[in-house]
Amino acid sequence: MNLDIWMHAHPLTYVLIGSYGVAFLIFAIEIAMVLHKRKITLQQVRLMHEASEEE
Amino acid sequence: MAINWFKYAAPINFYPLAGKLIPWFAILSALLCATGLYLGFVVAPADATQGEFYRIIFIHVPSSILSMFLYMIMAAYAAMGLIFNTRLSSMMATAIAPTGALFTFIALWTGALWGKPMWGAWWVWDARLTSELILLFLYLGFISLHASIDDPRRADRAAALLAIVGSVNVPIIYFSVKWWNTLHQGSTIKFTGTSMQITMQQAMFTMLAACWLYAMAIALTRVRSIILERERNTQWVAELAEVKQ
């Protein structure tokens, strides 16, 4: 009930934080995860090639 | 000069091409997103009946369109991988799935946020909403099935079947507002045109382009990691500058 009153009193804040804020947070997390995955994959591939060169 | 498109079906050629395209897509996406938000929040007027709440559509509609579009692209890539046994197609399908799932979640989330002040409910078991929720489960099913099989080629084939069968849900989502009497409003944007105010249209299409470019940038970055992982034993990966560092 309180949320209903608040959202009608502050519609732009509700829209900005609730939808855009959450959506951009999701995008930021996805970008961080994808970049982290690339970093880890590159490290693994480098280590694998270094190990095979040493042999 | 004719471009040999089949050349880019090989990971060895696609990997550097994707690397060149990613920064362009990312920069364009950020610029279009800033423009879209400016148009949507500053230039576009408040709606006569919905007030400021309608501004959710600038993220809700692009997310919903992309959730369906990305699924169709994912299913098409998965089908190509299954039929022609092309490695890159299956890798692309795997790379697109998480982004498609996130867009589906955002579409459902923002839809709920719009539904509460407009309908008085966060969620109703309406045909459009329910079929969109099934789409999210299909994405999650694709990702889980692929991750549960150790052999990547077998995982590609099993997940491709699920993606192809699941693609029947996309037209159901699109036509649900026509086929059934739903609480969700009918399509504002049709192939024949739209009745939307011009600045609202501009904001929405700009955000759609921004989200599409974002999806491409993120899927290409993800597929580069998948290519590296799967092709790690090949000579061309060993000779890559970033691997030699």
Image (cartoon, helix red, strand yellow):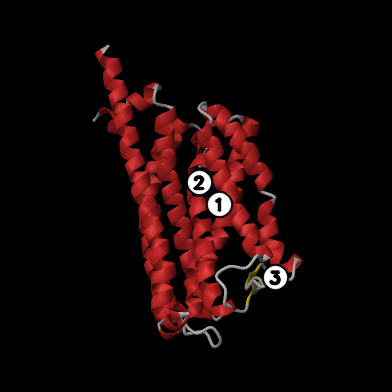
Residue type of the residue flagged with mark 3: Thr
Residue B24 visible from this viewpoint: no
Which numbered marker is on residue B182?
A: 3
Residue type of the residue flagged with mark 2: Ile
Residue contact between numbered discs 2 and 1, judged by CB atoms under 8 Å: yes
Residue type of the residue flagged with mark 1: Leu
Question: Which residue position is annotated with label 2?
Answer: B96
Say which quadrant the C terminus of chain B sits in.
Answer: top left
Q: Position of residue B225 (x, y in %)?
A: 39, 37
Above or below, B107 against B183 in this view is above
Check the residue under mark 3 and report the chain it is in.
B
* Residue, far top: A55
Residue contact between numbered discs 3 and 1, judged by CB atoms under 8 Å: no
Residue density around tag 1, few if under 14, some if 14–19, many if 20 or more, within 10 Å: many
User: Residue B176 is drawn in which quadrant?
Assistant: bottom right
Give the mark, 3 or 1, whose residue is nearer the N terminus. 1
User: As rendered, which of B153 and B114 lies closer to the eye?
Assistant: B114
Asked if marks 3 and 2 fall on the same chain, the answer is yes
Tag 1 secondary structure: helix
Above or below, B40 against B65 in this view is below
User: Residue B173 is drawn in which quadrant?
Assistant: bottom right
Residue density around tag 3, few if under 14, some if 14–19, many if 20 or more, within 10 Å: some
Tag 3 secondary structure: loop
Residue at the spot x=33%, y=49% of the render? A32
Above or below, B96 against A52 in this view is below
User: As rendered, which of B141 and B208 lies closer to the eye?
Assistant: B141
Asked if marks 2 and 1 fall on the same chain, the answer is yes
Rounded to the nearest angstrom, the CA distance separating label 3 from label 2 is: 30 Å
Question: Which residue position is annotated with label 1?
Answer: B70
